[in-house]
Image: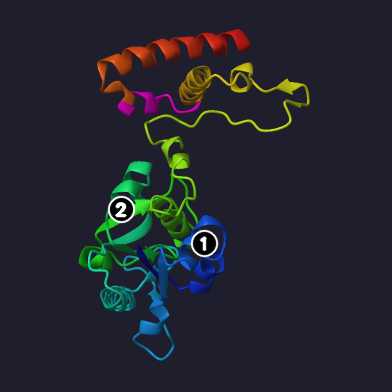
Amino acid sequence: MWFGVITLFPALIEAAIPFGIFGRAVRESRIQVQCFNPRDHAVDRHGTVDDKPYGGGAGMVMLAEPLLSAVADARRAAAAAGFKDVPVVLLSARGETLTQGIAASLRQRSGLILVCGRYEGVDQRFIETAVDAELSVGDFVVSGGEVPALLVMDAISRLETGVVGNPDSLAVESHLDGLLEYQQYTRPENVAGLEVPQELLSGDHARIAEWRRKSALLTTFERRPEQLAGSSLLEDPAERARLVAALEEAKRMARSED
């Protein structure tokens, strides 16, 4: 998959690329990342990329022209590398919140152009002319779109074939079926007086699977109860009945621990 990142601070993106699973994917050419700086497309000799907002107000607004030129440059680069289906996504606090489902949907495209906003925002005419979607990474404000862009690329690239070493890891991660992931334990069996649940030490795969299911349900019920309504587990009647029974057991477990 190919990512083109429109950013005034390409060093911010490039500094994060070499590390972890994402870095390995880039080194193995499973993922390609190119940065495009709007300042290189400024229309004056000062490299101006922002100006005061019409109507007054605090802060500055990114100019449309340098952004449009940078996006055009990114489109040419994507086409030259053989990537044709490359929508433009603006990282914006007013965008749709990124979810695992959105990441999976974007994974179906051959590439993405991610536009990192700065200052008070970007000229609306750039959005109407060049942007296909706006994405947010949460209900909070950050100084620019670079960190959100890295989050988007990481979430999508994990779904690319061969990027995650063990594909089974993806099957049990949080949000894939509407549930948060179950609790995890490793050696030793006792830490500060806290024991590993006996089910996980039993060697009985059915008991382990059932414990993990209840753990996932309890965690979701406690932290993100609204996700239970949207779980894919509710679509099948038998699964729905089993889920309800497991949830009731999880609730009893929670009450017994109080």
The secondary structure making up most of the magenta span is helix
Decide which of 9, 229 is in the foreground and name it. 229
Q: Amino acid at mark 2?
A: Leu
Q: Which mark is residue 24?
A: 1
Residue 200 numbered tag: none
The residue type indicated by label 1 comes to Arg
Q: Residue at x 42, y 37 (%)?
A: 171
How far apart marks 2 and 1 lie (CA) works out to 21 Å
Is residue 207 placed above or below 164 in the rendered structure?
above
The quarter in which the N terminus is drawn is: bottom left
Q: Secondary structure at mark 2?
A: helix
Look at the picture and state if 37 lies above or below 179. below
Q: In the image, 225: left or right of 240?
A: right
Q: Tell me which corner region of the image, top left, top right, bottom left or bottom right, holds residue 49.
A: bottom left
Q: Is residue 191 left or right of residue 210?
A: right
Q: Where does residue 73 sit, x and y in percent of width and height?
A: 30, 79
- Residue 231 part of the magenta segment: yes
On the rendered structure, is 258 left or right of 247? right
Residue at screen point 30% across, 21% down: 234
What is the crowding at mark 1: few (fewer than 14 residues within 10 Å), some, or many (at least 20)?
Answer: some
Residue 106, numbered label: 2
Q: Is residue 156 visible?
A: yes
Answer above or below: position of 19 versus 141: below
The residue furthest front is 203
Q: Element under label 1?
A: helix
Q: How is the image coloured?
A: rainbow
Can you give x and y, in whole percent of width and height, for residue 74 in the image? 32, 74
Quadrant in which the C terminus appears:
top right
Give percent across and percent down for residue 243.
38, 16
Q: Which residue, as the protein is rendered here, is positioned at the far bottom?
A: 45
